[in-house]
Amino acid sequence: MRRLVMLVLVSACALGAGCASANTADRDAFNAGYAAFEAGRWQDAVDGFTRYLRSDPTSADRGEVYYYRGEALVRLERRAEAKTDFVRAIGAEARPPIDQFARVAIGNLYYEEGSDAKAIEHYAKIIRHPDKDLPVPTVLLRMGVSLQRLGKWALADRYLGHLIQHYSETAAAKQAIRRLHADAFRVQTGAFASMTTASREAGRVRAAGFETRLGRISRGGRTLHTVQVGRANTYVEAAVFAQRVRQAGFDTLIVP
């Protein structure tokens, strides 16, 4: 998917068609960055793209190059720098679909760090008219999860339901099914093959002063019996409660 987008830029600049302002040195720098990117040599990719940008800061292709340098920076765990490059790609009015890929990329960074409102802001700007190469099922799932984390359960169901209806065969849809129609977060202290073991765990948790709720889930064709405590509207509230449960000596997993 992203390889195809990259080849659009290569065919225009690196293979001789010529960018509007690119000279041989510019193309050599870009080619070096591109080759390193394809090979997974992320620092070399950053270096090559940086040389290209320095050689012509006003290049019409700078938006694309910022985007790919940002992707390489993500692989290097230099997330703050990657965000800056994705913002630059958007600001440079990168050609479609690079502009949408940049918004997804920055949305993913915010999602992964738990900045759900900012993730939603970027995802929402592309989800109505997405390019065919975008990872739409993943974006829909993350929109739904972020909305749930913020306590917006009904709105989350709209995105999760759309995902299930239109992308039913994807892995993202299978995750969405487990979240659809949830209305709160709970703290799970365990999932057990045996109902007897689950009941024993529930007794231990109750003895520590927490009300318990037994449930069942299906994982890999197996039925597991879960022990859950508490009820929270937002993920932040659930995380605070989970800390109390951990301090009482129990494992915790926040689930919708």
Image: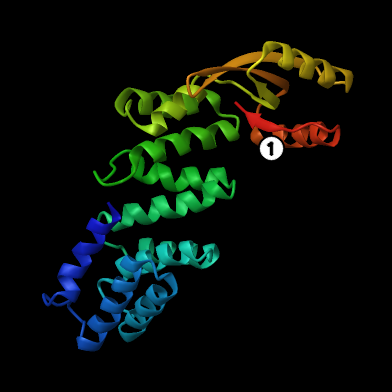
Q: Residue furthest left?
A: 17
- Between 195 and 166, the one nearer to me in the picture: 195
- Residue wearing tag 1: 236
Q: Is residue 96 toward the left or the right of residue 217 in the image? A: left
Q: Amino acid at mark 1?
A: Val
Q: Is residue 22 toward the left or the right of residue 206 in the image? A: left
Q: Is residue 83 toward the left or the right of residue 93 in the image? A: right
Q: Is residue 242 visible?
A: yes
Query: Which quadrant does the C terminus fall into?
Result: top right
- Between 188 and 137, the one nearer to me in the picture: 188
| Colour scheme of the picture | rainbow
Residue in the picture at 84% in, 33% down: 249
Q: Is residue 179 above or below residue 66?
A: above
- Tell me residue 50's x, y (percent): 39, 79
Residue in the picture at 72% in, 11% down: 196
Q: Is residue 163 toward the left or the right of residue 1 in the image? A: right
Q: Is residue 69 above or below residue 96?
A: below
Residue 21 falls in which quadrant of the image?
bottom left
Secondary structure under tag 1 reads: helix
Q: Is residue 63 visible?
A: no
- Tell me residue 57's x, y (percent): 34, 80
Residue in the picture at 40% in, 35% down: 140
- Tell me residue 9's x, y (percent): 22, 67
